[in-house]
């Protein structure tokens, strides 16, 4: 069918106000927070599951690709329309349908902003633990599709640990429900967790049931300051060895510290080589006891100082520093490439040293920060990709960062997904046999390769 007629059919499904095909509108949906860009042919914002199902039926029949999109905050090119087609923006499905205090679950639509769910459940004395740094803008559907982590991942786990059930529209336009509201359910294959982290390649997530937990009664927040970055990295592993699992254990190097101070002027120590941001929670006496043990470990590892937040405002400042880290680093140079290679916690010191060595080897600037407590670092390359020679050095550095992570028993991504940015490395982690199993699942569920083609399985992708 001709492109114009297809556009008319899409418009008839979602309505004229929610269909866009001008150059300017399409340009707005040609990229996410990664580097790659590609223009779609159309953009549609369906307002119901029924409209999504009709769009998928049309796409499957006519053979055009569909790229599901939430807030577009992805860092691996996950929603970039590499093969044109339709970008399906899901932000109109934004209702919190239920918060059940008796059985401790919430049901939300895919376009709900993550922080909106946090605010509503916390007002009831409950907690939805996954807290990605970008939660004020990310959507719940995007979090599920990428299996997002967050600052509390060390103690509480990531998105997959809280998803109980999903409503999904298949590539053929069928509406299916998987999972259960029950805390325990082992009926059939675990399709719920097949969709979690599938990056929009197997189905379109429209409704999510998540587990809630009681909110902790008390929190202790601390900042440990180090003159030696290696000792800060070693401290991460030593804290876990001590028998304490903090709610949060975040790492920032000197480059990150100074970028934040230039941006926010929070009062971080500019001369520190690294800082750790830590939080314990739970019953007050237990949280305080764990904080005391952490402080002792930090001081044993040559921390220059460990500052405890005495007021709620001081706590907020500590965590504002961490949540604005990426935004602060993005101001330093024209292009910012944020990676999330993850290693076992005991390998954090080696990973930190290795990233520093790679930066020096290729003469590039890398700010290193992240969820060090669960091994999930964010080496952030600050560059100018208009400089062809520098871009080549950056690509080599990225190759070596991933090779280093895998050599330490790590993984390519802890929370951002493979998308298109890391697709060429995936076989290095799983081997051809593992990749073949993933391809078989994709083919079985999406035989016409309609949903998000060009992601995860791309043969070779370099920086655009």
Image (cartoon, helix red, strand yellow):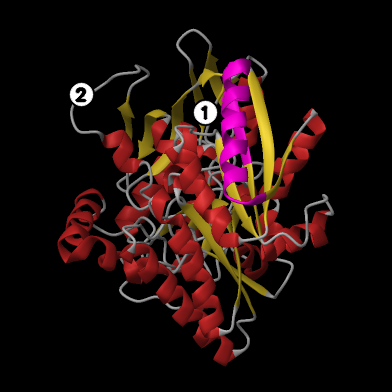
**In the image, is residue 458 above or below residue 156?**
below
Asked whether 381 or 211 is in front, the reply is 381
Q: Position of residue 249 (x, y in %)?
A: 56, 42
Q: Position of residue 383 (x, y in %)?
A: 63, 78
Residue at x-position 47% and y-position 64%: 81
Q: Position of residue 301 (x, y in %)?
A: 57, 49
Graded by Cα atoms within 10 Å as few (under 14), some (14 to 19) or many (20 or more), the crowding at tag 1 reads many
Q: Position of residue 421 (x, y in %)?
A: 44, 68
Instruction: Point out the stretch of residues depicted in magenta.
Output: 278-303
**In the image, is residue 388 above or below residue 124?**
below
Q: Quadrant of the N terminus?
A: bottom left
Residue underneath mark 2: 187
Q: Secondary structure at mark 2?
A: loop
Q: Is residue 287 magenta?
A: yes
Residue at x-position 62% and y-position 61%: 228
Quadrant assignment, res 137: top right
Q: Is residue 261 magenta?
A: no
Q: Which mark is residue 108?
A: 1
Asked whether 338 or 312 is in front, the reply is 312
């Amino acid at each position: 069918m001709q492109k114009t007629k297809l556009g008319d059919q899409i418009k008839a499904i979602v309505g004229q106000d929610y269909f866009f095909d001008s150059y300017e509108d399409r340009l707005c949906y040609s990229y996410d927070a990664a580097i790659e860009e590609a223009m779609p042919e159309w953009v549609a914002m369906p307002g119901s599951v029924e409209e999504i199902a009709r769009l998928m039926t049309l796409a499957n029949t006519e053979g055009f690709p569909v790229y599901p999109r939430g807030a577009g905050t992805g860092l691996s090119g996950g929603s970039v329309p590499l093969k044109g087609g339709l970008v399906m923006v899901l932000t109109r499905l934004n209702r919190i349908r239920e918060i059940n205090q008796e059985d401790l679950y919430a049901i939300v639509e895919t376009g709900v902003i993550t922080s909106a769910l946090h605010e509503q459940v916390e007002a009831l004395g409950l907690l939805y633990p996954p807290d990605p740094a970008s939660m004020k803008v990310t959507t719940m559907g995007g979090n599920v599709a990428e299996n997002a982590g967050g600052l509390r991942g060390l103690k509480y786990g990531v998105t997959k640990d809280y998803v109980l059930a999903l409503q999904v529209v298949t590539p053929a336009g069928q509406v299916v429900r998987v999972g259960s509201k029950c805390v325990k359910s082992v009926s059939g294959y675990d399709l719920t967790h097949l969709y979690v982290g599938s990056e929009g390649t197997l189905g379109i997530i429209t409704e999510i049931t998540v587990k809630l937990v009681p909110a902790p009664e008390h929190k202790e927040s601390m900042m440990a300051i180090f003159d030696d970055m290696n000792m800060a990295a070693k401290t991460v592993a030593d804290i876990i060895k001590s028998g304490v699992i903090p709610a949060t254990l975040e790492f920032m190097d000197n480059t990150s510290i100074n970028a934040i101070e230039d941006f926010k002027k929070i009062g971080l120590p500019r001369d520190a080589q690294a800082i750790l941001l830590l939080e314990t929670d739970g019953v007050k006496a237990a949280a305080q006891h764990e904080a005391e043990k952490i402080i002792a470990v930090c001081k044993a590892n040559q921390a220059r100082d460990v500052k405890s937040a005495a007021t709620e405002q001081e706590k907020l400042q500590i965590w504002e520093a961490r949540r604005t880290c990426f935004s602060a680093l993005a101001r330093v140079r024209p292009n910012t490439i944020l990676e999330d290679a993850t290693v076992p916690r005991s390998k954090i010191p080696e990973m930190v040293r290795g990233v520093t060595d790679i930066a020096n080897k290729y003469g590039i600037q890398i700010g290193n920060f992240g969820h060090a407590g669960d091994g999930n670092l964010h080496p952030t390359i600050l560059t100018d990709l208009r400089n062809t020679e520098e871009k080549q050095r950056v690509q080599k550095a990225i190759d070596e960062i991933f090779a280093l992570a895998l050599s330490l028993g790590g993984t390519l991504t802890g929370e951002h997904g493979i998308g298109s940015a890391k697709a060429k490395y995936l076989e290095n982690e799983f081997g051809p046999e593992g990749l073949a199993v993933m391809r078989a699942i994709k083919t079985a569920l999406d035989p016409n390769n309609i949903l998000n083609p060009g992601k995860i399985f791309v043969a070779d992708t370099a920086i655009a």
